[in-house]
Image (spheres, helix red, strand yellow):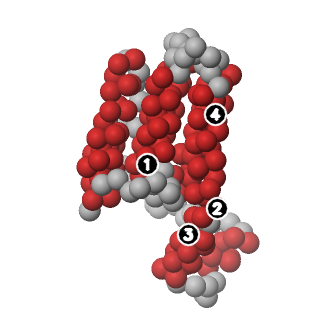
Amino acid sequence: MSPRKPRKTFFPKTRLSELAGRPGGIPRDIAIEGAVAAIQELRGESDKMITLLIGAIDELVTGSKKGQMSEDDMIRVLKYADQIVTLSGTFGYQFLDVAVRSLCDVTDGLVRANLRDMAPIAVHVQSMRLLGPGANTLTPDQAGKVLNELAKILTHYKFGSLAVPDDAVDEATTAVAG
């Protein structure tokens, strides 16, 4: 059997491929520095939004009756928490990010199990206030203890975490300490 001849591959010319092939532009490192600086300019606005969203979740908790929350309020908690996750991840609030993801796991688990317990959500809100912007900065060890206690709530209810790997608390602690 004779070896196959290589086939010629032709790439169509597109406007994007022509633009990408042109010399010029700015170096990658400078572009990244500019992007990071642009994001950091939004930190103050983001911090205010995180604080408002934590407050909105707290209002849902304090407005609940007899230690129970409605499913609609729990869905609102998930909506607000999702926004906090986006902001905390973008602006490097690693401990807050883990706490809010844990809140999402607990709240989602409660909704799926048709449970209306307000207490685990309230504990998460208190923890988020400790770990959020404007709070007294906890040491990595202190923050790790808070996050480990939140993980016990998931264990108590037998809810798994879909978003946070089991070693996320250790990784967050190492990242901030290092």
Q: Secondary structure at mark 1?
A: helix
- The amino acid sitting under disc 4 is Glu
Q: Marks 1/2: CA distance?
A: 17 Å
Which residue position is annotated with label 1?
131
Q: Identify the mark at residue 40; answer none if there is no mark.
A: 3
Nearer-N-terminus badge (1/4): 4
Q: Secondary structure at mark 2?
A: helix
Q: Marks 4/3: CA distance?
A: 29 Å
Q: Marks 2/3: CA distance?
A: 10 Å
Residues marked 2 and 4 touching at CB (< 8 Å): no
* Number of marks in the rendered image: 4
The residue lying at 34 percent from left, 22 percent from top is 155
The residue lying at 55 percent from left, 75 percent from top is 37
64 lies above or below 8: above
Q: Marks 2/4: CA distance?
A: 21 Å
Residues marked 1 and 3 touching at CB (< 8 Å): no
Which residue position is annotated with label 4?
59
Q: Estimate the x, y position of residue 115 in percent, counting from the top left.
A: 53, 13
Q: Nearer the viewer, mark 2 or mark 4?
A: 4
Q: Nearer the viewer, mark 1 or mark 4?
A: 4
Which residue position is annotated with label 2?
45
Q: Is residue 4 left or right of residue 67?
A: left
Q: Secondary structure at mark 3?
A: helix
- The amino acid sitting under disc 1 is Leu
- The amino acid sitting under disc 3 is Gln
Nearer-N-terminus badge (1/3): 3
Q: Farthest bottom residue?
A: 24
Binning the other alpha carbons within 10 Å of mark 3 as few (below 14), some (14 to 19) or many (20 upward) gives some
Q: Estimate the x, y position of residue 63 in percent, counting from the top left.
A: 65, 26
